[in-house]
Amino acid sequence: MTTTQLIDIPDSRTPLNSIAAATADAVAARASNAQVVFGASAVATAGVSSEVSLRSFSVRVDEPPTLGGTDSAPNPVEYYLAALLSCQVVTYRFWAERLGVEFDDLTLSAEGDLDVRGFFGLDADVRPGFTAVRVIADISGPASDGDYQRLQEIVERHCPVQDLTVNATPVTTELRIAR
């Protein structure tokens, strides 16, 4: 299998380009180096809350009272929005450095529309997830508007969490019953 790099990685000593170049070299040496597995585990706690472990980190998840929780932590779809925005921040930084596009400030916000009839099974024609997500990226700095527009388009194409939303990802579940 051959791959084509969309944009060359500059020969620079900047931190993120160094990571991209080292990754490109590792993948060129062995294609399997491109494959990474991330994992998480969750334990149900009181009510509808849970404790999720991710590497050496732990996050709490809950729902607002209108969805059966005690509002002790963000809910799963709020964590999705956080994941989308934080992934875009990472993607903006990597690609800005790769393209040589400087920015002074970057602030992102997002909101998503969710119809609870899908989750509660009140209407079989309503999906349980977001029906729309809107992201606003506020950026400032010395680059041209065209440079920032190109950067934003590249971020949308390369952000892994955004890709999870716009492209179908197969999910399989194995149920193991303990007795």
Image (cartoon, rainbow, N blue to C red):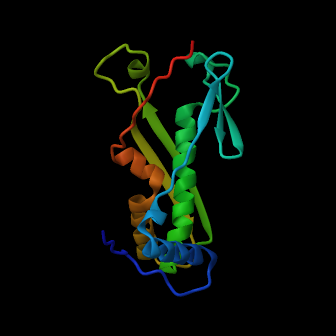
* Foreground residue among 143 and 47: 47
Q: Is residue 12 left or right of residue 154?
A: right
Residue at 58% over, 73% down:
19
Q: Position of residue 35 (x, y in %)?
A: 46, 58
Residue at 37% over, 13% down:
122
Above-or-below relation of 4 to 171: below
Count every numbered label the image shows and give the total. Answer: 0
* Foreground residue among 76 and 46: 46
In the rendered view of the protein, which quadrant contains the C terminus? Answer: top right
Residue at 59% over, 15% down:
68
The outermost residue toward the front is 179
The outermost residue toward the left is 125
Q: Position of residue 43 (x, y in %)?
A: 64, 26
* Foreground residue among 3 and 142: 3
Residue at 56% over, 79% down:
142
Q: Position of residue 3 (x, y in %)?
A: 33, 71
Q: Is residue 135 visible?
A: yes
Q: Position of residue 115 (x, y in %)?
A: 41, 25
The outermost residue toward the bottom is 11
* Foreground residue among 12 and 53: 53
Q: Is residue 127 left or right of residue 143?
A: left
Determine which quarter of the picture holds residue 8.
bottom left
Q: Is residue 102 visible?
A: no
In the rendered view of the protein, which quadrant contains the N terminus? Answer: bottom left
Q: Is residue 89 left or right of residue 169?
A: right
